[in-house]
Image: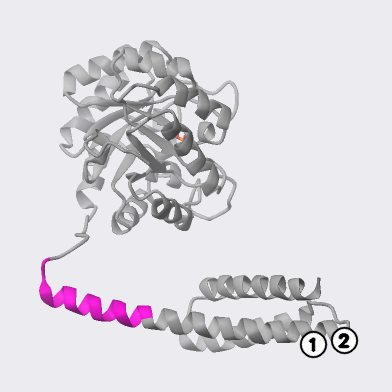
Amino acid sequence: MKQDNNSLIHRKRLTIAGACSAESRAQLLEVARGVAATGRVDILRAGVWKPRTKPGSFEGAGDVALEWLAEAKELTGLPTATEVATAAHVEKALKSGVDLLWIGARTTSNPFSVQEIAEALRGTEVPILVKNPTTADAELWIGAVERLAKCGVRNIGLIHRGFAGINLSGYRNAPLWQIALDVRRRLPELPMLCDPSHICGNRTALLDVAQKAADLDYSGLIIESHPHPDEALSDAEQQITPAELGRLLESIVWRRTATDSIVCNDELERLRGTIDRLDEEIFSLLARRMEVSDEIGRLKLRNNLTILQSGRWQEVVTKVLTTTDRLGLGRNCVESILEAIHLESIERQNKIMH
Ligand code: PEP
Ligand code: MN
């Protein structure tokens, strides 16, 4: 995928902050001044057109807010960003000088809308960030990126804002970090920002999530801020004042991804070599386990037995968990590995049977 590496979105530790929604000229200018004063924000965000779950909620101030954004840029010198969901939004935002656009989670979920936006962006240089779709579907997220790339868009980035409808206590949208990491592995040339505000849905967990993103080497953050968060017309629970934002950004520790220390690099290399050898052992053992399982499949076929004998599987799980509890391995990890192994065994035995 051809990407322009000089674009604004490739800045290391890029920080976008500002209001969930542009509510009024006064609110937007106040938040703009506040986030600029932190000295740690690169781009001002504000939702001009807001996709709301229920009708009757505040849907953003609309077109007029583009003038306020332009004024905020003039006032603070910060480039601006807003969400687009239609071709008309793209055209209006570009015409009024918005510097960066993003596609919201609900829009990423709809290929027709993404296609329309992609066509509208053809021939422009504006950077566009694609939020993950609301459902835990990496393909839909990557599909949206591909639609943009096919229209020649060369400044694409990603925003991980968590996934809806998954009941993980403490989060409004479950982070499911593994999905985001998988997408990063598959689209390594695209920067990925984390959106702790929409993942958390509250103020208290913001720092934890932002720190986790920093530790996972995300390229930046997008965080919502409001001069009077309790009075915000959208996402009040998760917004923080610019002063709180400044303190939060100050307390995030961004670690190095590499070091010049020869001692450290030698030790890392040695340990990684050990990991590589262990992985080889683990998967050789797994292959041997599958061969035994195939043998069982053939035995079942000769004796007309069902593939799944649930009592037996429960016995395997109990035995393994007794061992792994003793070894101090986390149950979530062991259970997902066992499930994957079980599914593969069943699939192989199924092939033998038919
Ligand atoms: C937003 O950034 O304010 C927004 C609507 O986010 P999402 O699309 O992630 O819900
Ligand atoms: Mn919001």
Question: Mark 1 packing: few (<14 Cα in 10 Å), some, or many (20+)?
Answer: few
| Left-right relation of 141 to 27 | right
**Which residue is nearer to you in this view: 60 or 134?**
134
What count of labels does the image hold?
2
Question: Is residue 342 depicted above or below 163 in this figure?
Answer: below
State the image coordinates of residue 311 (x, y, percent, origin top left).
77, 82
Q: Main secondary structure of the magenta part?
A: helix
Q: Which residues are magenta?
A: 260-276
Based on the displayed image, in which of its 4 quarters is residue 195 positioned? top left
* Tag 1 secondary structure: helix
State the image coordinates of residue 47 (x, y, percent, origin top left).
40, 25
Task: Single out the residue that lies furthest toward the right.
Answer: 304
Based on the displayed image, in which of its 4 quarters is residue 131 positioned? top left
**Which residue is nearer to you in this view: 106 or 237?**
106
Q: Tag on residue 299?
A: 1
Q: How is the image coloured?
A: one colour
Residue 85 appears anywhere in the view: no
* Residue found at x 50% / y 89%: 326
Question: Is residue 302 depicted above or below 64 in this figure?
Answer: below
* Tag 2 secondary structure: loop
The quadrant of the rendering that contains the N terminus is: top left
Callout 1–callout 2 Cβ contact below 8 Å:
yes
Hey, what amino acid is under mark 1?
A: Leu
**Which residue position holds label 2?**
303
Residue 285 appears anywhere in the view: yes
